[in-house]
């Protein structure tokens, strides 16, 4: 049975790519209000595609970007037929700095690079349009080859993943009955390497914070006031510099509450992966691990929390010079969380820490973006994980790695807390996909083998 | 002061026409540092040429390596050869207008609005810095010529367009045109009054050097989840450097930074203490309260006689609406250092760069770019006949003894004139601290403009 469906998937690959490219051409940036209508367009595009496949699909408005919900129940379904949810997100990151792209971010380009590898370039190719389309196209292969899906499926595609998912929790709560399934499959993660598939079982949480320090009430002439007037950039950089000690440890009091040391067994398993710290950093032009001294790079990324500055701005930043002493300085921060770290508590302790560093005649304001999510870990004995692992092994001829991820996928936590279901994180992204960066790409083989993997996983679930 | 009286009347009667001319000049968005405004700078220069020619000055526009310079020469027919030769200096370039959103009226559509206190104010970029200021002198000359037909001295008017940007352009021009610019003294109108009622003559001037620092960590922007922890964040590197520049007492920690800085003389400290400068008011006006400079010095000393390290701008990563979980490749900061007499700009720059380099991790890169021209701090001689004439004239006009002050802002031209033309400068200006120069809603009080013109007429009379 599987072979026939896989052949259908193979034969339809070119058409699958064309559809993906249509989808990629929609600049569905969720964080910027200016692209709100593009997000709606992307949602409608998905509904049209899924309806054509026989799904009962529609666009569900939220206070932010809409959700896409689609249901499929096989005619032959019985009480024993598993009901699984597939999750992806149609929104993408902003493209800036736009001038660093070699191709236009929203004009997807397929290219065989000098290394002979065929890649698709464009914003969203890997995060997450290319990924979510692997299970959409797998469903198409099943339906085209057999007339039906082997399982009852619910597709939930959201449009705010890149902006903290503010509408997600209320939406899940309001539609808990409709969306609760036996398990969720989330396609938004990476393979271990180009040849080795992976299932991610450990995810860092995330909480955003933005701070604005105000010194003088207006921008001042740096000559007439420089020396006597406090510069808010000076304060802000002092705050940022004070976040870490010399050993890369975060200095905010109470920050590590709820963080447990890595179990010896996990440490051993990860050590066996022969992860090269050097290669990982060299690929991005670095060489010295910047995290906590004494922790391996894998541990730093998968099992340790961070305080990261995502952006900083203040004063004059245009061409030429302006001898200004600015009124305000801003920074955007994110904290990656592990274990039982509590996002709300982290924000509170951070704010207290900052306030302690602000001179009496200056002000600080905080404006978080919400979407705080604690870390989550999934049991490796879960039946869906085991079935998926077997299917991936069949497709790649390699044991999938059960790994952690430094990135946050709050949805996993929400599915567990609100809908009571575990999530299986299977994705086909690669570390060099440049997601969130200029020249984002998705390898053609990721897309193709991704579709084939889902064909197998869907089949395995029905057995 | 018989010669002054009819000129003062002429100024009073012609105030409206003088204001109209100033508003015309303010409409040119002559932002010297941004190439997008090059044509506007040329147009401003052209307008000035026409106006100076109208006064009978032999005027030309001279190309430089930066924005054009306007030079108008007045030969003073019939004057004895020992009559003084004055070089008057101003600048037609203005600061960028951003953040434009914070202006109450468009920055380059100047308007005069009456405040609740009854004061008429000219709002617009350049109203105070420096178009409004230098026009006080030009308009005084216009009135003097209308009444007396001849000025009592030879005069060269030099209006440049790179004051807010790279001052090395003008310095090169001055160095290459020493003969054409030869004079006995320079008059400069680009400074503040001591307070709303008291004029000032500036003798302590801070210099300025600028440097832009770009730190590169990863070669591309990274996902802060996948790389956060092991990958070095250039914003953190840059922040750490910035945080280390000042110690707890506001002192700059860059080794060698204070080399050549002389202590403030007891006499000057005494004079300045007499000015009854209120740091509470000075800082309170701008929403602050605690002097942020070196603890051992008064706020006045901090701005007039002590050097600074200031960050004018910082930028890195995602700064638009919403959030982006990026670990950026680059972070940039723009610095200026205010220097006082005795500090060597080149040495300060080198010391700063060394300080930065020592703090950049081995796998990160740092790039520097010098910005603006270097200028050293200067202390002007306060015992010349020109200073004496100005003191008398300002006393007559304002009915209060002018203050001998310092200036925190750099006027590199003073050092340039001293170095290349071997002349001292007389610094008299009528700007007020509330003028918001370099900020949104820059303004110049009509009273300052009016009494400024009258003050120059009196100074001209003192010199006849």
Image (tube, coloured by chain):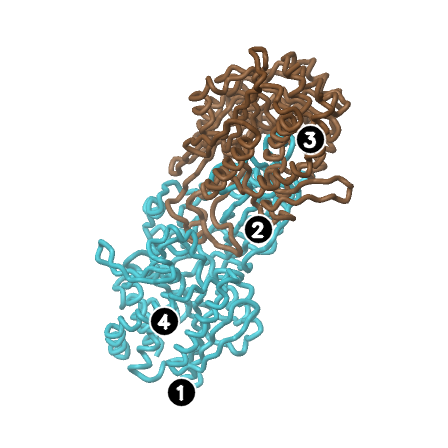
Residue annotated with mark 1: B77
Q: Is residue B351 visible?
A: yes
Q: Gap between marks 2 and 4, in whole Å? A: 36 Å
The x and y percentages for residue A44 are 50, 36
Chain B: drawing colour: cyan
Residue annotated with mark 2: B212
Quick one: quadrant of the C terminus of chain A? top right
Q: Is residue B16 left or right of residue A202?
A: left
Mark 4 and mark 2 in contact (Cβ < 8 Å)? no
Q: Gap between marks 4 and 3, in whole Å? A: 83 Å
In the depicted view, which residue is nearer to us: A129 or A142?
Answer: A142
Q: Gap between marks 1 and 2, in whole Å? A: 50 Å
Q: Which chain does the brown colour mark? A: A
The x and y percentages for residue A336 are 56, 27
Pointer 1 local density, CA inside 10 Å: few below 14, some 14–19, many at least 20: few
Element at label 4: helix
Quick one: quadrant of the N terminus of chain A? top right
């Amino acid at each position: 049975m599987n072979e026939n469906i896989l052949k259908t998937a193979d034969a339809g690959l070119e058409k699958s790519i064309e559809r993906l490219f249509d989808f990629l051409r929609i600049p569905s940036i969720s964080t910027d209000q200016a692209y709100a209508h593009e997000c709606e367009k992307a949602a409608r595009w998905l509904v049209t595609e899924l309806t054509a496949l026989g799904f009962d699909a529609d666009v569900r408005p939220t206070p932010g970007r809409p959700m896409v919900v689609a249901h499929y129940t096989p005619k032959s379904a019985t009480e024993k037929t598993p009901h699984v949810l597939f999750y992806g997100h149609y929104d993408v990151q902003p493209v800036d700095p736009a001038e660093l792209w070699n191709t236009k971010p929203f004009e997807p380009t397929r290219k065989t690079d000098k290394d002979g590898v065929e890649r698709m370039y464009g914003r969203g190719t890997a995060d997450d349009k290319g990924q979510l389309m692997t299970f959409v196209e797998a469903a198409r292969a099943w339906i085209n080859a057999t007339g039906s899906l082997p399982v009852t499926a619910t597709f939930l595609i959201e449009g705010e993943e890149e902006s903290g998912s503010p509408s997600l929790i209320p939406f899940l709560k309001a539609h808990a009955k409709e969306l609760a399934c036996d398990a969720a499959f989330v396609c938004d993660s990476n393979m271990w390497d180009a040849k080795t598939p992976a299932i991610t079982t450990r995810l860092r949480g995330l909480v955003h914070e933005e701070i604005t320090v105000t010194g003088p009430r207006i921008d001042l002439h740096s000559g007439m006031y420089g020396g006597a007037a406090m510069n808010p950039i000076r304060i802000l950089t002092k705050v940022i510099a004070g976040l870490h000690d010399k050993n890369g440890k975060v200095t905010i009091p109470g920050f590590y509450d709820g963080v447990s040391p890595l179990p010896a067994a996990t440490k051993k398993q990860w050590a066996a992966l022969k992860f090269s710290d050097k290669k990982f950093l060299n690929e991005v032009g670095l060489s010295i691990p910047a995290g906590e001294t004494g922790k391996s790079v894998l541990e730093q990324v998968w099992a340790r929390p961070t305080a990261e500055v995502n952006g900083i701005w203040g004063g004059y930043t245009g061409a030429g010079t302006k001898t200004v002493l600015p009124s305000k300085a801003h920074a955007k921060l994110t904290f990656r969380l592990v274990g039982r770290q509590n996002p709300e508590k982290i924000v509170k302790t951070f704010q207290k820490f900052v306030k302690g560093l602000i001179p009496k005649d200056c002000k600080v304001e905080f404006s978080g973006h919400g979407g705080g999510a604690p870390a989550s870990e999934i049991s490796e004995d879960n039946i869906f994980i085991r079935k998926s692992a077997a299917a991936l092994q069949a497709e790649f001829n390699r044991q999938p790695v059960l790994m952690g991820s430094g990135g946050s996928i709050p949805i996993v936590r929400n599915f567990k807390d609100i809908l009571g279901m575990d999530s299986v994180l299977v994705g086909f992204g690669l570390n060099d996909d440049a997601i969130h960066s200029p020249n984002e790409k998705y390898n053609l083989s990721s897309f193709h083998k991704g579709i084939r993997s889902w064909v197998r996983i869907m089949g395995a679930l029905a057995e | 002061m018989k010669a002054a009286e009819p000129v003062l009347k002429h100024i009073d009667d012609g105030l409206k026409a003088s204001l109209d001319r100033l508003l015309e000049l303010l409409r040119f968005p002559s932002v010297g540092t941004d190439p997008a405004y090059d044509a506007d700078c040329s147009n401003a220069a052209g307008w000035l040429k026409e106006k100076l020619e109208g006064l009978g000055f032999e005027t030309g526009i001279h190309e430089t390596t930066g924005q054009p310079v306007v030079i108008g020469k007045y030969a003073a027919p019939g004057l004895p050869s020992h009559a003084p030769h004055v070089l008057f200096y101003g600048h037609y370039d203005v600061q960028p207008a951003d953040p434009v959103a914070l202006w109450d009226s468009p920055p380059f559509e100047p308007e005069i609005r009456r405040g609740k206190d009854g004061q008429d104010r000219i709002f617009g970029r350049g109203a105070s810095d420096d178009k409004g200021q230098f026009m006080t002198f030009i308009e005084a000359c216009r009135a003097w010529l209308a009444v007396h037909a001849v000025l009592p001295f030879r005069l060269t008017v030099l209006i440049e367009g790179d004051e807010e940007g790279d001052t090395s352009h003008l310095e090169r021009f001055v160095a290459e045109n020493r003969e054409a610019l030869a004079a006995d003294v320079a008059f400069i109108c680009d400074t503040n009054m001591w307070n709303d009622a008291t004029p000032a003559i500036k003798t302590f001037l801070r210099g300025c050097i600028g440097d832009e620092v770009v730190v590169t960590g990863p070669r591309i922007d990274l996902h802060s989840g996948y790389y956060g922890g092991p990958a070095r964040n250039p914003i953190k590197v840059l922040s750490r450097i910035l945080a280390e520049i000042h110690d707890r007492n506001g002192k700059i920690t860059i080794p060698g930074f204070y080399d050549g800085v002389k202590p403030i003389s007891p006499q000057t400290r005494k004079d300045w203490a007499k000015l009854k400068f209120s740091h509470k008011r000075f800082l309170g006006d701008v929403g602050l309260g605690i002097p942020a400079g070196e603890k051992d010095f008064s706020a006045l000393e901090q701005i007039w006689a002590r050097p600074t390290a200031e960050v004018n701008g910082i930028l890195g990563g995602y700064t638009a609406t919403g959030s982006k979980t990026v670990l950026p490749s680059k972070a940039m900061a723009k610095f200026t250092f205010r220097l006082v007499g005795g500090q060597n700009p080149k040495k300060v720059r080198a010391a700063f760069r060394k300080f930065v380099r020592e703090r950049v991790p081995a796998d990160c890169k740092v790039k520097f770019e010098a910005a603006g021209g270097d200028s050293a701090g200067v202390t002007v001689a306060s015992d010349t006949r020109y200073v004496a004439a100005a003191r008398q004239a300002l006393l007559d006009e304002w009915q209060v003894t002018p203050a001998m002050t310092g200036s925190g802002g750099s006027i590199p031209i003073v050092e340039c004139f001293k170095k290349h033309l071997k002349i001292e400068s007389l610094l008299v200006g009528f700007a007020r601290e509330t003028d918001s120069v370099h900020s949104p809603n820059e303004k110049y009080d009509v009273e300052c403009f009016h009494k400024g013109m009258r003050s120059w007429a009196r100074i001209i009379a003192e010199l006849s």
